[in-house]
Image (cartoon, rainbow, N blue to C red):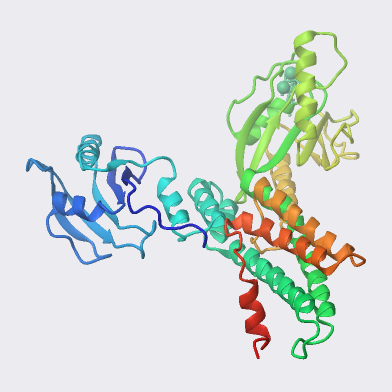
Amino acid sequence: MRFNLMLATSKTIYALSSGGLPSGVAVVRVSGNGAFRAAKSLAGALPMPRQAALKTIRTRNGLIIDRALVLTFPGPASFTGEDCVEIHVHGGKAVVNTLLDELSSFENFRLAEHGEFSRRALENGKMDLVEVEGLADLISAETEMQRRLAMEHAAGGLSDLYNSWADRLTRARALIEAELDFADEDDVPGSVSDMVWADMKQLHRELSDHLAGADLGEIIRDGLKVVIAGPPNAGKSSLMNALAKREVAIVTDIAGTTRDVLHVDLNIEGYAVKLYDTAGLRETNEIVEREGIRRALRTVADADLVLSLAEIGEEPQRTFPGFAGRVLAVGTKSDIHPGIRNGYDVLISAVDVAGLNELHELLRRDLQARSGMLSLALPSRLRHRTLLTDSLGAVAAALASEDRGLDIRAEYLRQAATSLGRITGRVDVEDLLDVIFSEFCIGK
Ligand SMILES: Nc1nc2c(ncn2[C@@H]2O[C@H](COP(=O)(O)OP(=O)(O)OP(=O)(O)O)[C@@H](O)[C@H]2O)c(=O)[nH]1
Ligand SMILES: [K+]
Ligand SMILES: [Mg+2]
């Protein structure tokens, strides 16, 4: 790990780590080299590390704040890597405020900044960047699939993969260096290159497959963007309200009712779905409506899936400018058009729910088809995608420059490993020689 322990002189931080007040219990967390000193002052003798004890918490003036569970976690075997203390008080606003006030009065103490406990964990090598991101996602996860994806990241599944790839790149370079530097000596196996490049081809495949999962990772994390589009009065806003189970959008029989893009978050079978209602598409000179239509088309272009609505009997639009994804043709108002079925993927009515269940089922199946692979070691952020693309590009460049010098090809592999290292925040320092010496007995 590159990060060093430069925190010896830094401040001890504290914060309310549990949710909003009032609550049954509130957890105040303290981290830093003053944590135990403060805990002793507040609670008297401290319990054994990692064991809870019920203590009376007092200000330095002897005022009792509360009776609370106190836990200590000596560094470096703590979340942040520093000495940490948890105080579980009753979750009253005044209780917590008095405790935080008291903590603020200790020398070199201050309120933690956003994410600062995790940041210290990162700086102390307790977690890498992907794990920190995973933890943040885990805390904000609202659907089961978001939770599972975040858990995979927080638990190091993705980091392990990137580290193993970075190790392979390092090893490949070590072998190339060996070939360059010690080509005359007997101990270096012949045709090392063949081995290296076969493995790099394989790595290239694994990287591309992994990148192909980025769409899904981002969809699970950010939600599938489903956009309702179609002509005025098709029943778009009525569908939005029916799926949201509340009156999000204004519904009238006036064509051109919706102007702004409206949005609700849905949870469909554990997947997050972002549903958008848009202005009815038609030719118009009315300035406000035109702007609404421009926004509608922009939203469609950014969609993962479009629900193209048309009142039964009308032709649903099958393609949209700038959108290459899946379009579901939805025939609306089935209650007043009985018996017609052809030309639509699903028929719905905002006044009875039969078709809505079918639409729900289509969405569920679409999401499941996208997540056909069940491994959730997927990149889930643009940052991951960008660096993975860089890494893949560098491996491809190394593979493609057969007619160039080995040193140039090795340099590409170094770049590939650096990009992977940037994802985890673990940009490898040079341990090339270690690898060489461990694999060959060059120092004879
Ligand atoms: N009978 C029946 N009427 C419907 C249904 N869905 C919508 N309507 C009616 O159709 C009219 C238009 O509905 P909206 O939901 O406002 O249509 P929209 O596509 O959002 O229209 P714009 O926002 O103007 O583009 C309203 O009078 C609705 O009550 C349905 O399933 N059955
Ligand atoms: K309308
Ligand atoms: Mg509308």
Place of residue 88 in the rendered image (x, y in percent of width and height, measured from the top left): 25, 51
Q: Which quadrant: the C terminus?
A: bottom right
Judge from the rendering whether residue 81 lies leftward or rightward of residue 386; answer left or right.
left
**Taking 282 as reference, is 203 above or below it?**
below
Q: Is residue 251 left or right of residue 137?
A: right
Q: Does residue 334 appear anywhere in the picture?
A: no
- The relative height of residue 111 versus residue 422 in the rendered view (above or below) is above
The residue at the point 43 percent across, 55 percent down is 121
Residue 376 place in picture, x, y as percent: 64, 60
In the depicted view, which residue is nearer to us: 63 or 111? 111
Residue depicted at x 61% and y 63%: 428
The x and y percentages for residue 379 are: 66, 55
Q: Quadrant of ligand 3?
A: top right
Q: What percent of the width, then of the height, locates residue 83?
A: 30, 58
* Point 74% across, 78% down: residue: 178
Give residue 324's quadrant in the image. Answer: top right
Judge left or right: residue 62 versus residue 332.
left
